[in-house]
């Protein structure tokens, strides 16, 4: 009972913090989070920009196979009945707080406070994903990873890309500014360790790197 009360207390404190301070509350619940990969694919499942931070996929063929698997599963109409795939909506968290006693399940749906993302669990991994126009954003972590952290990384990445592309979020713009998107990924995660999730901070660092390197596209983010 004491542990349950502590969990509920932790839940209340996280909700009260709001979006911008959620990430600061996470270490008390899950230390040393690790990201396995971040994927940006097009509407056909082809690579736009990807970064892997895990040895789970040792070859390029293995990485491509994983990307195909992720893309196919998240595109299937009946995917929500296969494994654990949950469509998040603005009303779910209210019902969960009232009717669900398991803090873990309630905690999962705090992702609602961050983004309109979806969650898939397969191949012993948790994948948080969202689609914007013809770009598909994915963040992968282990099956014991903190879903809220993964969702925060996803939101930071997609928001930073939106800033870098000046809200012209589509494949053509992404490919024309691929160097900026790759810099963006470097600012978010290094070796699986999360460095930054605030989109405005990420965009500012990418702009600074572009200016320092004399990149011809730097004027797009300054």
Image: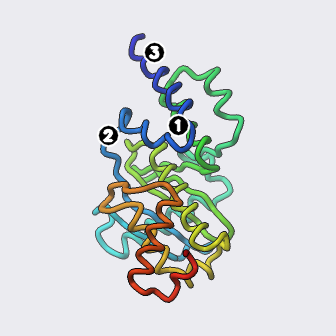
Q: Residue at x 37, y 56 (%)?
A: 195
Q: Is residue 170 above or below residue 12?
A: below
In the image, 169 versus 69, the foreground residue is 169
Query: Disc 1 marks which residue?
Result: 108
Mark number displayed over residue 31:
2
Residue 1: quarter of image: top left
Residue 31 located left or right of residue 147: left
In space, the residues marked 1 and 3 are separated at their CA atoms by: 18 Å
Give the structural element (helix, strand or loop) at label 2. loop
Mark number displayed over residue 217:
none
In the image, 167 versus 84, the foreground residue is 167
Name, please, the residue furthest toward the top. Answer: 1
Query: CB of mark 1 within 8 Å of CB of mark 3?
Result: no
Mark number displayed over residue 5:
3
Q: Is residue 166 above or below residue 194?
A: below
Query: CB of mark 2 within 8 Å of CB of mark 3?
Result: no
- Image quarter (top left, top right, bottom left or bottom right) of the C terminus: bottom right
In the image, 133 versus 120, the foreground residue is 133
Pointer 3 local density, CA inside 10 Å: few below 14, some 14–19, many at least 20: few
How far across and how far down the image is residue 14, in percent? 50, 32
Give the structural element (helix, strand or loop) at label 1. helix
Q: Residue at x 53, y 44 (%)?
A: 20
How far across and how far down the image is residue 36, in percent? 37, 58
């Amino acid at each position: 009972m004491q542990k349950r009360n502590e969990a509920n207390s932790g839940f209340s404190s996280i909700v009260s913090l709001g979006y911008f301070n959620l990430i600061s509350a996470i270490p008390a619940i899950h230390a040393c989070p690790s990201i396995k990969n971040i994927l940006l694919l097009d509407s056909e499942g082809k690579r736009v920009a990807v970064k892997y931070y895990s040895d789970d996929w040792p070859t390029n063929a293995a990485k491509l196979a994983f990307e195909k698997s992720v893309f196919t599963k998240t595109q299937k109409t009946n995917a929500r009945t296969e494994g654990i795939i949950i469509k998040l909506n603005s009303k779910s968290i209210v019902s969960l707080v009232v009717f669900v006693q398991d803090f873990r399940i309630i905690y999962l749906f705090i992702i609602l406070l961050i983004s309109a993302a979806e969650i898939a669990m397969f191949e012993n991994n948790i994948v948080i994903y969202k689609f914007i126009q013809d770009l598909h954003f994915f963040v992968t972590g282990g099956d014991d990873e903190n879903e809220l952290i993964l969702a925060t990384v996803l939101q930071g990445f997609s928001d930073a890309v939106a800033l870098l592309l000046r809200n012209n979020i589509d494949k053509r713009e992404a490919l024309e500014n691929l160097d900026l998107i790759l810099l963006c990924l470097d600012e978010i995660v290094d070796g699986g360790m999360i460095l930054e999730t605030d989109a405005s901070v990420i965009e500012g660092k990418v702009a600074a790197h572009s200016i320092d390197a004399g990149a011809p596209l730097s004027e797009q983010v300054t």
